[in-house]
Amino acid sequence: MNTQISLTEALSQSGLESIDYIILFTYIVMLVCLGVFLSYNRGTKSTNDYFLAGNMLTWWAVGASLIAANISAEQFIGMAGTGYADGIAIAAYEIMASFTLVIIGKFLLPVMMDQHFFTMPQFLRNRYTSGVGLSFSILWLFLYIFINLTSVAWLGALAIEQIMGLQGLSISIGSISISTRMAIIISLFFIAGLYSIHGGMTSVAWTDVMQVVFIIGGGLATVYYALGAMAGDEGGISEGFERLVNFAIDREYAHDTHFHMIIQKSHNPEAYDNVPGIAAIVGGLWLTNISYWAFNQYITQKGLAAYSIKEAQKGFLFAAFLKFLIPFIVLIPGLCALYLIQSGDIAATGNTIRVSDEAYPWFIKNFIPTGIKGLSLVAITAAVISSLASMLNSTATIFTIDIYRKYINPDASDTKLVTIGRLSAIIALLIALVSANPLLGELDQGFQYIQEYSGFLYPGITIVFGFGLLWKRASSTASIWITILTIPLGVLFKVFLPDVPFLIRAGYVFMLLLILFVTLSLSSKKTEPTQNIPKLERDVMKKWGYILFIVAGCSILIAATIDIGTLLLPNGSTPDNNIIAYCKDIGFQAFYFFGFLSGACATFLISDALSTKQDPKALPINLGLLSTTRGYTYGAILVGVLTLLTYILLW
């Protein structure tokens, strides 16, 4: 069989025309040229230049880079695939992330920036012990290489392969034959590495501004034509949107999860496993969002690279508003694909979707016109490359600063450290390349793979970092035990509670670890007299601490009432005719987690205000850092209102 002819024939049948390839090629050339230009023009002589862009990022660069680093094939392919399979509830990851961003910008980001560190493990080393910092360095390197780099490249390659019609084909180079998907992965790694490895954060952050334009623009263009395809030849996007709404109603709206933000377990157990009802609002999704947006190196590094705290906060607020666009961009094509498949005409031709993650690329290949198809392909490619570039830079940062400089060569010059950073990024690429197919070859929904296996780390990360930043009694001994137990407890719960959704399992792990952390910290003998806190600040902390204790008590009482009420339900009670059964069906046990989370915040506020002791490595308490501009306050309120309205309208 002549492989080259097969590839040529496949490309000719893909629906892509010369203009589409020209658009894609032009984008790649522009990206690489801009990244290389920035690396030479701004220079990467010092570690601060290479890893933090010389602390010169503006708010719009911070916000754009946050979104470009976050939005990847995980959303375009994985989230669209889950939307196709289960419905819009998966949008909770994006909508709640938007709300989380303004919380982090207000309460956590200023404290972190005030410490002037390069990496998150470096903070742990300074706040607790070198062992804790090293442990999380290794954990993050493992996560970035084997979960993030592999999944983003794999899902991106899957999309590009399908759009170009190259599924199942291979390329022969001499006696070596590789699949087209692996060839695409190699190409994506090469392009991302070409400018990011040389230019570091400077190239990554500023090229992300261009990337976001392509991501949002290409995504919106795809949505426009997706709704047009829904309408058919005689209608426009308004007609397409109307048909989408009618499709929701025609599919027995009350019992179909595809158009509900809150999923009932009795209606769709599989979808409930992914987004377990109200747990998206008050459950373990908070662990995912706080850990990812506040303590994830390749995200937080963008904020740390800003030239001031206020500028970083504006960047986080800008990213919060951009985040609201993402569910619209990625889910509508997936839902339109569902409509077209189930309408019968498409399915009858055999041109259907085999696995959920094929929904978005399937739609582009079959319904997006020439030219716009190239722009849609660029949006996916930009999303993948920008995320890979950020992950590479953060992988290099952690290895260089937290392992090489700390344990291998403490006296290394800046030039040496930059060189090591580049080499470590190349090695990370090679490892991810070899690991991609064994880890992801058989997955149906890649988005859930990323969320579940990252979730083993999130409970411990939230506790160790959150309390380390905000609680003066947080002890090194407690942090060590949390570090040791986080993953084993997660695995244990998965083994013994396999039918419990991972977002709820993560909440249970968080509650156990929280009790252990607080107990060990309060019993620690390694303390010193506390700093003097002004009375006005103490009063503010006590007031909010007592309020949060009330919230915590009410949350736990709600969850307990539902559990007890479930045991006393009369025969014949169902979620459709009994409020207790309904609350149980949408996962009200998640309120236990929300109670513990609120109680944790209350604990450190009241303890910081009243305790006469503190850990020797506790950070100074400075409520002045938490002040924000009026514009930030209004923006945060608007994000909260948008979040509330979304859940009310699409409950």
Image (spheres, helix red, strand yellow):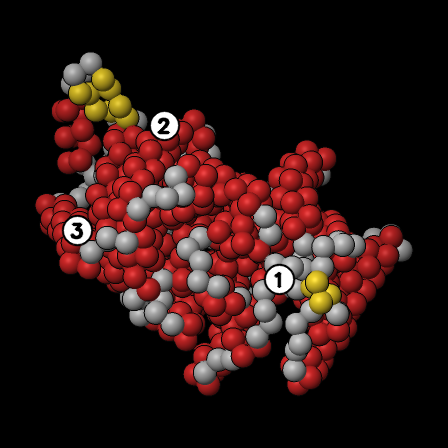
As drawn, the label of residue 155 is none
Residue 383 visible (yes or no): no
Indicate which disc, 2 or 3, sits on the residue closer to the N terminus: 3
List the single residue furthest toward the front.
Answer: 411
Position of 268 compared to 610: left or right?
left
| Amino acid beneath label 3 | Val
Tag 2, which secondary structure? helix
Dot 3 surroundings within 10 Å: few (below 14), some, or many (20 or more)? some
Gap between marks 3 and 1 measured at Cα: 42 Å
As drawn, the label of residue 434 is 2
Gap between marks 2 and 3 measured at Cα: 27 Å
**Residue under pointer 3:** 36
Depicted 352 relative to depicted 632: above or below: above
The residue located at (72%, 55%) in the rendering is 526
Quadrant for residue 166, please give it. top left
Which residue is nearer to you in this view: 299 or 175? Answer: 299
Single out the mark in the foreground, 2 or 3. Answer: 3
Position of 178 compared to 643: left or right?
left
**Residue under pointer 1:** 618
Dot 2 surroundings within 10 Å: few (below 14), some, or many (20 or more)? few
List the single residue furthest toward the top.
Answer: 175
Single out the mark in the foreground, 3 or 1. Answer: 1
The residue located at (67%, 60%) in the rendering is 615
State if disc 3 and disc 2 touch (CB < 8 Å). Answer: no
Q: Position of residue 284 (x, y in %)?
A: 62, 54
Which residue is nearer to you in this view: 413 or 308? Answer: 413
Tag 1, which secondary structure? loop
Single out the mark in the foreground, 1 or 2. Answer: 1
